[in-house]
Amino acid sequence: MLKIYNTLTQKKDEFIPVHDGKVGMYVCGPTVYNYIHIGNARPFIVFDVVRRYLKFKGYKVTYVQNLTDIDDKMINKAKEMGTTVKEVAERFIAEYFKDADALGIERADVHPRATEHIKEIIELIKKLEEKGYAYKIDGDVYYDISKFKEYGKLSHQKIEELQAGARIEVNDKKRNPLDFALWKAYKEGEPYWESPWGKGRPGWHIECSAMSMKYLGETLDIHAGGADLIFPHHENEIAQSEAATGKPFVKYFMHNGYLFIDKEKMSKSLGNILTVREMLQRYPKEIFRYFMLSAAHYRNPINFSDEQLQAAKGALERLYNAQTLFGEKYSKDNFRSVLNKEDEEMLANIEKFKVEFEGAMDDDFNIPLAIASLFNFVKDVNKYIEKDDFAKEPMEKIKQTFDTYLKLLGIQKEEKEEILEKDILELIEKRQKARAEKNWTEADRIRDKLLEMGIVLEDTKDGVRWKKKI
């Protein structure tokens, strides 16, 4: 029986989807104004595994992840770059997918963009206005949180406590400091859309309600994201969605813990923001992904450091070494057809491992415990293959088990072809030529191709240096 810790109820609830056998899952995606950093990557990796496991359990999962392509950060970035918000969005959506793909994160079934759902957003705001939950001031439309009596039920705080402790936008026009913008009036130089309230653009929170309900219905099974989204983002989503429909918005809210770097929170002031792109120049994606999944339960904070990544590297190498050794034994294909006592024990150990792994995952996706059971399985396999005397059935099942469970976690080893130095130097020369011709797109493409091959480039005053990733 699968149980999920529900932020809404503050306990582990038995997972019973709204519709039998089907799961509607919405995970808040990036605001596409820059490269994603490793803190952004944690929920994307964690909930990628949650989705994989739900599918493994036999559920038909519809997975939606939005792309916020209009907000204040987008507008500021466009001004900084001397370009349009749309061009900023197109560039960093492509960069996001490049990083997500590199981390083995499977694409969502739908990646809706805020700017492509203005009609749905306006309809939702109109409904809130008609029901008395929204008010207009000077072209802005705000949600009146005093009208929603359950406001604060996700963050489990009273309105007075939220007002005292929240970092909220100061605005003298609002009736209540916690009221939030559904629609923002047009300002010169900003993108805008026509609406019943005049020219303007949507607020941040409304996009997720409009898009999630369009693709998953008025009640979602799972809504997930980082703990920083509990308030105000997800709290506000509940308020506007349930006010509009009169139905529960989400059955299970899931939130992952924060990521720290060397025990400090990432921030621009500390200069310790590490992008996924930069991290992948230091470590292969399998190591980073393994670290993210094994360092702590997803609800707990984790600390990123080179020591932690080196420890993850060592653990993963033990796992891969066992898999390689088994592969060598398996390739000999000199199996017995009749089972003996050792074969029977190995078959029993395989079933024991499956029970332990799935038991850990069924307990609120305890991935570190599931991984620990994988290492116990490896010990059993190593013991079994010490002698070159195997039966076909356990060997086939060991292979199937390795393949299935490593893929479920997304940490299966990718076999890379041997790279010849002459091929590397040839690509570097082509990149240098592209740079000389100011063909930056081609230069970046070649650099990314080399990175995929495990080759990191360093541009120095003495020329280009290259090295293999750790």
Image (cartoon, rainbow, N blue to C red):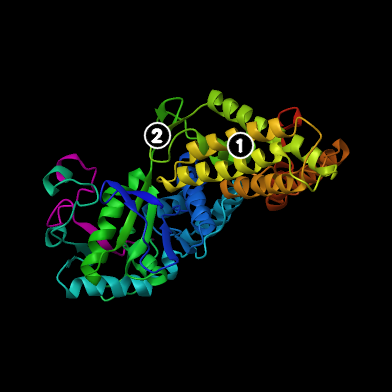
Relative depth, front residue between 461 and 144: 144
Q: Residue at x 14, y 49 (%)?
A: 159
Of the numbered discs 1 and 2, the one sitting upstream in the chain is: 2
Provide the major secondary structure of the magenta segment: loop
Marks 1 and 2 in Cβ contact (< 8 Å): no
Side of 154 relative to 63 (left or right) = left
Q: Is residue 188 magenta?
A: yes
Relative depth, front residue between 111 and 190: 111
Image quadrant occupied by the C terminus: top right
Q: How many marks?
A: 2
Residue 352 at what x, y percent from top left? Answer: 55, 42
> Could you say which disc has been placed on residue 9 in the image?
none
Q: Which residue is tagged 1? A: 377
Answer yes or no: is residue 44 visible.
yes
Task: Name the quadrant containing residue 301.
Answer: top left
Task: Name the quadrant containing residue 182.
Answer: bottom left
Q: Residue at x 32, y 51 (%)?
A: 13
Segment colored magenta? 163-189
Q: Please, what secondary structure does the residue beneath circle 2 have?
A: loop
User: How much space separates mark 1 and mark 2, taking CA atoms?
Assistant: 27 Å
- Using the image, determine if residue 130 lies above or below residue 268: below
Q: Residue at x 81, y 45 (%)?
A: 336
Q: Which residue is tagged 2? A: 301
Residue 18 at what x, y percent from top left? Answer: 35, 66
Q: Please, what secondary structure does the residue beneath circle 1 have?
A: helix
